[in-house]
Image (cartoon, grey):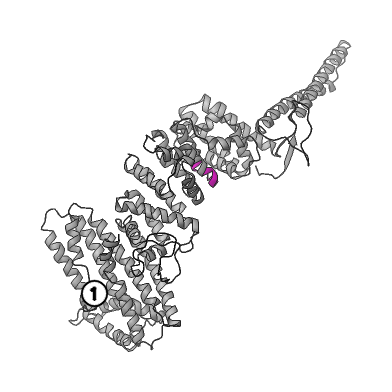
Amino acid sequence: MAPTAEFCGIDPEEMGTLAASLGGAADRLTAFREEFDRKLGQNGISVPALREIADIADWGRTQVSMLHDRIDLINTLGNGAPELGRAGGAISLAAGQRGLVRLPDELKDFEVAQGLARMYGEDIFVNFGGEPQAKLIHEHADKIAKLAENPQAAAAFFALLSPKVRDSLPNLIAVTGSKTAKQDLAAFSKALGAALNAPTLVPAFAKVRDDLVKPADSKVAAWNRLALLKGANAPSSVRSAAARALTLDEFAKKPRQDWRAGGPAETKAYDLPEDLVAMGLEVLTGDGAAVRDAFAKMGGADVKLSRPDKMKLFLDYAKGTGNGDEVVEAFGRAMEAGSEVTTEKAGQHSPEAAAFALDAIKVAGSFGDDLPMIGWDSMSVIAKSYIHELASGARFDKAVYRTSGTGVPENWVLLPPGPPTFYLSPGDTFRFLKTFVGDKRLTDDFDATAAQFRYDTLTAAARLDAQAEQSHFEQTSKMFGDLAGLEFKATLDVRGEQDAINEMVLDIAKNTVSFGIDGISPTSRGAIATWELIKTFGVSTGLDKVADTVETQVEKATEARADFVLRLKYDMARLLHDADYPASDPPAEIVNRRTGNLKTYDEFVAEAKQEARGGKNWEQVLQEKLTPYERWMDSNRNLDYKAESASTHQANERPKEEIDLWE
């Protein structure tokens, strides 16, 4: 059923005249055969050729029937089409004449589509029920899916299918109890998507297309239409128009109403939300252009809300309805799509996607950790895609009083890797971090992205400073110190606040997790941090209102921060050396023989633990191994200064304290 680019001009009236002529000829042949057969029979003569004449007449009558069916098909598919005109004007026709109908030259495929439309619309969904109906639906579903190979045949199928059946397909399939309902509906959606994504060459399909994006008679009908469109991969314009017409426009005008629409059979069969608002968002997911268009036009001219106000409507509604998780989950995926987190690379976002992400970040951040947990995943995905913007948003060194927006803040100093697509305030950055740091898995995912971005950015800064002595490396380090500080503070706030006594635990944690670079040797830092935590939670476990889960969460957050502080100076020195920052050759014992690079702090620790023997603990061995490293850095003043400054900047606690003022 391959599509063709050829067209044919068909005049149904002329075809009817041809059918009438052929029918008359068949009747005359029949009369001729009967007369001669009678006369010859009277004289005892038998002529076999007369039987052949009768067969020709019968063939003619079958062709007449076929032509009339084809005329009906052409008239139906051509409904709404303009008359086929000549260059320079339309054909002159007598009153009442329709003239030529222009259709793709695929009449055989259209007849297949007609047969399927009749079979489903006039037989399977009418004359059967229950298991037999489910079996028949599934038995022919592959033929529906195959229509997608020829979009115009698919368009013909939906143009010929009863509108009542078309708008009820999800319900009609699900109520049979079929175990293949999801697969079967997907076949219809696939065919519909093919038709919607192709040029509308079958005139009658234009009405189907228009009907899909008009308000439905009921919420149930709207839900069914959206369920059919959900898997259609329809064009952005259709997705947006349908979602708005079937639910979102009305939602923007009157959000506080009962939006339940999907029945138990349908929601179970298709794993789709019961809530109609959630369904509207589901149709938009995966298509950034559709999401942005829907949020721009939602509610029409009567709704004066800004895009952030519209976004907030969904989260406010979700918090007050029993179907809130459905709404938030779909909302989160819509925010991902509108921000183009999967279709565009981080740091290379288009202006329209970035503007949408800015609004999403500010709105979600206004809820902080009060955002329903099911939406945290999406916020983490957005955070990873917009890591550049979050890092610059955490900066406290310039324009700390700034508000979030696309304009460059006053007195701003540009740092590697270049300008972000928008500028967040420290407060908006902090609030958005709180939308996902309550989940360790999501925090770990974000940290992996932040770590890679930090490495790439600091490497770029080190190379710039190696070429011309500047302070890119130190300033960029400070930016990441600010981001780490805000994330740490957000993590403590969120994970600690999950218990009624969170304020006490947070106060204890705040007073025991600040470790400076100077004055604490590498061999004792870990022991001090551990001991401080032991003391903290040794006291708190004596208070029977302190939950073990809270202690564990705060302890993990604190230990991660302490580990980060521990290795900073050595990581900074290694990164500068890898970027060819000017320095003398390092001693062989601190160089990895295989890679030729400075050993990492983890390599030193691993070696120390392997070599610790003879009464020496591994911390003592580690100190001995780090001594030549320290001497080498001391002998390279500029590198040493940069490494020390960068590590101090990244380990500072200032953002954690200042955010309370600037939040």
Query: Could you say which is closer to the camera, residue 232 or residue 236?
Result: 236
Is residue 523 rendered to the left or right of residue 428? Answer: left
Query: Element at badge 1?
Result: loop
Q: Is residue 162 above or below residue 400?
A: above
Tell me: residue 659, above or below residue 363. Answer: below
Indicate the quadrant where residue 661 lies: bottom left
Instruction: State the image coordinates of residue 227 (x, y, percent, origin top left).
Output: 47, 38
How many dots with numbers? 1
Expressed as whole percent of the image width and height from the top left, the position of residue 228 reads 50, 38
Q: Which residue is mark 1?
A: 516
Q: Is residue 600 visible?
A: no
Residue 73 lies, in percent from the top left, at 67, 30
Quadrant for residue 37, please give it: top right
Q: Residue at x 25, y 76 (%)?
A: 517
Q: Is residue 517 magenta?
A: no
Can residue 155 be seen here? yes
Task: Decide whether residue 232 is among the magenta residues.
Answer: yes
Quarter in which the N terminus is drawn: top right
Is 515 placed above or below 407 here? below
> Residue farthest to the right?
43
Q: Which quarter of the image is occupied by the C terminus? A: bottom left
Q: Which residue is farthest front? A: 410
The residue stretch that appears in magenta: 229-239
Residue 484 vs residue 223: left or right?
A: left
148 or 402: nearer the viewer? 402
Identify which residue is drawn at 58% across, 31% down.
Answer: 161
x and y, in percent, of residue 579 in the image: 42, 79
Neighbor class of circle 1 (other Cα within 10 Å; few <14, some 14-19, many 20+) is some
The three-letter code of the residue at mark 1 reads Gly
